[in-house]
Amino acid sequence: MNPSENVAPIAARAGIAAATALLAGLSLVGCQAKESTPSGSTSSGSAAGDQITVAATDTTCELSGTKSGTGPATFVVTNNGTKVTEFYVYGAGDRVMGEVENISPGLQRKLVVQLPEPGTYQTACKPGMIGDGLRGDFTVTGDAVQIDTEGKFKEAADNYKRYVNSQTDALVPAVDAFVAAVKARDVNAAKAQFPVARTYYERIEPVAESFPDDLDPRIDLREADLEPGQKWTGFHALEKQLWVTGLQPDANALADQLVADVKELDAGVKAPGFTVDSTKIAGGAQGLLDEISKSKISGEEDIFSHTDLWDFNANLQGSQTAVASVRPILDERDADLGKKVDQRFSESEALLAKYRQGDGFVLYDTVTEPQRQELSRSIDALSNEVSQVQGVIAPQ
């Protein structure tokens, strides 16, 4: 069945949430890295403020420098390998300070990350986007830097935090409704609820990735990304049962775990210690676009249900919201870039609207390969513009 059937009330609420979200922001969070690599080590030394180049292959992660001063640090990552890779910067306790994902072979990506405290951080390249990656120590010296405390930067951070809270406020009851249908063995109702509940998560997925204890994999791990011995939980484990195998004896346990995990996310973003670094918001915007063009465009995300276009739409909304939150800063520094970004968002939204069906979308297995490539090109063009925003709005 088309999951858009029987979900009109919920989908309508989702549309309202998306509309209000356009005044708030989205954040990208990264990871850490260690120093040594199998066939090459990072070099030392880098003047504060200089760009640090990262040459990534399938077996090495070579940085032009492993030192920086406190404040913003810029990494230019080039994938010279054969596998899609990621690059992370980690702080103490494996706190993700910044990341870029889905860097295809031959592509180059830029990451601007705030390193406000002196100390030892880590960098990591993750060929194949799995495991702990090729890690190396990264030393930051200088006085502690206070960020996001006044003016437009604080406003952007506050907007983003409100947006995240609003999305988890909606996510928890949506997952409750999905789980209730699973436990009632009402497969049709559960199928209808599945893409709607995921919408709230997909808009703010980078936030879940910032929390420790593998919160994001517990909620959203795909079967293809399972590592040996890893327990599979979350949306996609239930997706396979609903669309392929039928509900299994562990369905209720998986459902309960999903509820617990999204409640953990909700509690985390509402905790007093949860803060937003406004300089990461634009990176999050681009990360969500890359989720579509470099990963989801193939149909591998919702491989059993083919509800991928709901995810595309949520990622696009989250990215647009992120840019909206930093627009006062962007317009002040490069108004022309803001206009280009607006135009690209309009083009991508119009293209995605062609696949609307009722309150949802057509199933992705009905979208032809040429149509998928058209979507990919549109998102790539949008990402190219959004990729410039982070550098423009970085504190000077």
Image (tube, rainbow, N blue to C red):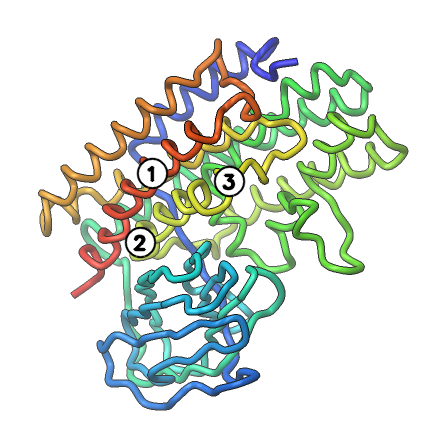
Query: Does the residue at mark 3 contact the one at mark 2 (Cβ under 8 Å)?
Result: no
Q: Find residue 161 and report its horizontal and vertical position in percent.
A: 39, 44
Image height of 296 relative to 49, above or below? above
Image height of 148 relative to 51, above or below? above
Query: Does the residue at mark 3 contact the one at mark 1 (Cβ under 8 Å)?
Result: no
Can residue 231 be seen here? The reply is: yes
Q: Secondary structure at mark 1?
A: helix
Q: Residue at x 50, y 64 (%)?
A: 82
Q: Residue at x 36, y 60 (%)?
A: 107
Q: Find residue 267 and report its horizontal and vertical position in percent.
A: 57, 45
Check the image and name the residue furthest to the front: 370
Q: Which mark is residue 377?
A: 1
Among the two numbered marks 3 and 1 on one chain, the one whose residue lies closer to the N terminus? 3
Quarter of the rendering containing residue 391: bottom left
Q: CA distance from mark 2 to mark 1?
A: 28 Å
Image height of 187 relative to 60, above or below? above
Q: Find residue 191 and report its horizontal and vertical position in percent.
A: 67, 20
Q: Amino acid at mark 3?
A: Lys
Q: CA distance from mark 3 to mark 2?
A: 27 Å
Can residue 317 be seen here? The reply is: no
Residue, disc 3: 296
Q: Nearer the viewer, residue 344 or 391?
A: 344
Residue, disc 2: 278
Q: CA distance from mark 3 to mark 1?
A: 13 Å
Classed neighbour count for the residue bearing mark 2: other residues with Cα under 10 Å, few (<14), some (14–19), many (≥20): many
Among the two numbered marks 3 and 2 on one chain, the one whose residue lies closer to the N terminus? 2
